[in-house]
Amino acid sequence: MVTVDAHIWRMKHLALALMLITAAPATAQEAPPAPPADEGFSLMEEGAKMLLRGLMSEVEPAMNEMGRALQEVQPAMQELLALIDDLRNYDAPRRLENGDILIPRRKDAPAPAPATPLPPPSTGDIEL
């Protein structure tokens, strides 16, 4: 997986390469004819599109992996949200000395809905 630092490093080197290419002296003896005024903007636009496409192609695998991870976590998050009901019914979390985190329910909060029993734990193999 490519890190953000690697992306920044690549972007810096790409920017340096673009500056060196544009700063290189022309080898022809005659100056090329000046392009129409709006052609320069279209070339810049195409360059920006190419740069963004390149960045997207590098970021896409990480985004796909994150999407798969979210799909795996989604059922557990739905169970947790069903137990919590409404976040406004709780005070700020507190960390105990042993590292446990408590999220106390407000005293003025309505009574929680009865909890639905959780399914029994599976006895099959656990994939890590």
Image (spheres, rainbow, N blue to C red):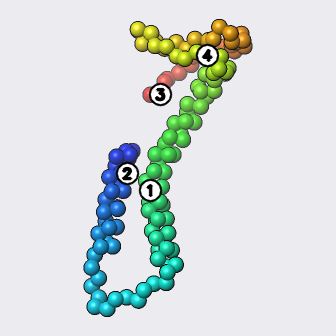
* 3D distance between C-alphas at marks 1 and 3: 34 Å
| 7 left or right, relative to 65 | left
Disc 3 target residue: 127
**Quarter where residue 99 is shown:** top left
* 3D distance between C-alphas at marks 4 and 2: 40 Å
Disc 4 target residue: 90
Q: Does residue 119 appear in this view?
A: no
Disc 1 target residue: 55
Disc 2 target residue: 7
Q: Where's residue 71, x and y in %?
A: 57, 36
Q: Residues within 10 Å of mark 2 (few under 14, many from 20)?
A: some
> Which element is circle 1 on?
helix
> Which element is circle 2 on?
helix
Q: Amino acid at mark 2?
A: His
Q: Amino acid at mark 1?
A: Leu
> Which element is circle 4 on?
loop
Q: Residues within 10 Å of mark 3 (few under 14, many from 20)?
A: few
Q: Earlier in the sequence, mark 1 or mark 2?
A: 2
- In this view, the mark in front (4 or 2): 4
Q: Does residue 124 appear in this view?
A: yes
- In this view, the mark in front (4 or 3): 4
125 or 92: which is nearer to us? 92
Q: Is residue 41 above or below residue 124?
A: below
Q: Where's residue 82, x and y in %?
A: 66, 21
39 or 123: which is nearer to us? 39
Q: Is residue 82 above or below residue 57?
A: above
* 3D distance between C-alphas at marks 1 and 2: 8 Å
Q: Is residue 3 above or below residue 69?
A: below
Q: Earlier in the sequence, mark 2 or mark 3?
A: 2
The residue depicted at 47 percent of the width and 60 percent of the height is: 52
